[in-house]
Amino acid sequence: MKTTHSAFPIADCTLHRIEFDPASFHEQDLLWLPHSAQLASAGRKRKAEHLAGRIAAVHALRDYGSKAVPGIGAQRQPLWPEGLSGSISHCATTALAVVSRRPVGIDIETLFTPQTAAELQYSLIDSEEERLLRLSPLPFPLALTLAFSAKESLYKAFFGQTHPLIGFDSARIIALSQTQLTLQILSSFAPNIGNKTVNVLWLARQNAVITVCHDFPSGS
């Protein structure tokens, strides 16, 4: 599969990006993965995305001197080397990965259209969050995309601590600026960090948004 690698910083993280051409994917490309047999029943699109994500992850792990290829956990989560945390996300023909020595989560999402925002808003945010997002200087579809993405990044960063069946109502957006969102974590997300807040950084790239959760929860 044809891929192009690049990297860029956000705060104290380095994001590794793989641009890939799904049309150039071949089944034998998966043989590069030690866990390729686990993908045998996956569709072509899923295989190409997975491969691109793992390529990005390998680049990210090299920053820490590791040659590992993250495997697949029981809940389809990436398995990272001991002592490291990481996260992978993909959208359209872009895959991103980040690795850190402390919890980290990343997400990339295509910007919601006004119609998609209208259809999804009540499954993603409550009335107080809606008020906050509509009062921000950002267009509502962008603000809602960020809210969705930030909650995804939060979940990925603290995956090992969360309840099994958490929903989008287990974290609440309480502030939004031009560079970050602040989320209040509820006890339904994870008892040990419930009622704390966490900052999630964001940036826009073309028709997509990227969020990174690389902050320790704070507060009571």
Image (cartoon, helix red, strand yellow):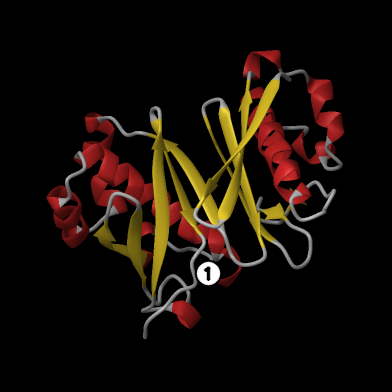
Q: Is residue 3 above or below residue 136?
A: above
Q: Could you say which quadrant of the image residue 116 lies in?
A: top left
Q: Is residue 120 left or right of residue 4?
A: left
Rendered residue at 41%/73% (across/down): 188
- The crowding category of the residue bearing disc 1, from other C-alpha atoms within 10 Å (few below 14, some 14 to 19, many at least 20), is some
Whether residue 72 can be seen here: yes
Q: Could you say which quadrant of the image residue 142 lies in?
A: top left
- Can you give x and y, in whole percent of width and height, for residue 5 in the image? 67, 30
Rendered residue at 83%/50% (across/down): 68
Q: Is residue 90 above or below residue 125?
A: above
Q: In this view, does 142 lie to the left or right of 217?
A: left
In the image, what residue type sits under mark 1? Thr
- Return the residue found at the far top: 23
Secondary structure of residue under mark 1: loop
- Can you give x and y, in whole percent of width and height, for residue 50 in the image? 67, 36
Query: Which residue does the numbered mark 1 point to in the structure image?
Result: 162
Q: In this view, does 106 lie to the left or right of 140?
A: right
- Report the front residue among 153 and 17: 17
Rendered residue at 51%/70% (across/down): 163
**Position of the N terminus by quadrant:** top right
Whether residue 120 can be seen here: no
- Can you give x and y, in whole percent of width and height, for residue 183 in the image? 35, 65
**Position of the C terminus by quadrant:** bottom left
Q: Is residue 195 above or below residue 69?
A: below
- Report the front residue among 76 and 41: 76
Q: Number of marks in the image?
A: 1
Q: Could you say which quadrant of the image residue 19 lies in?
A: top right
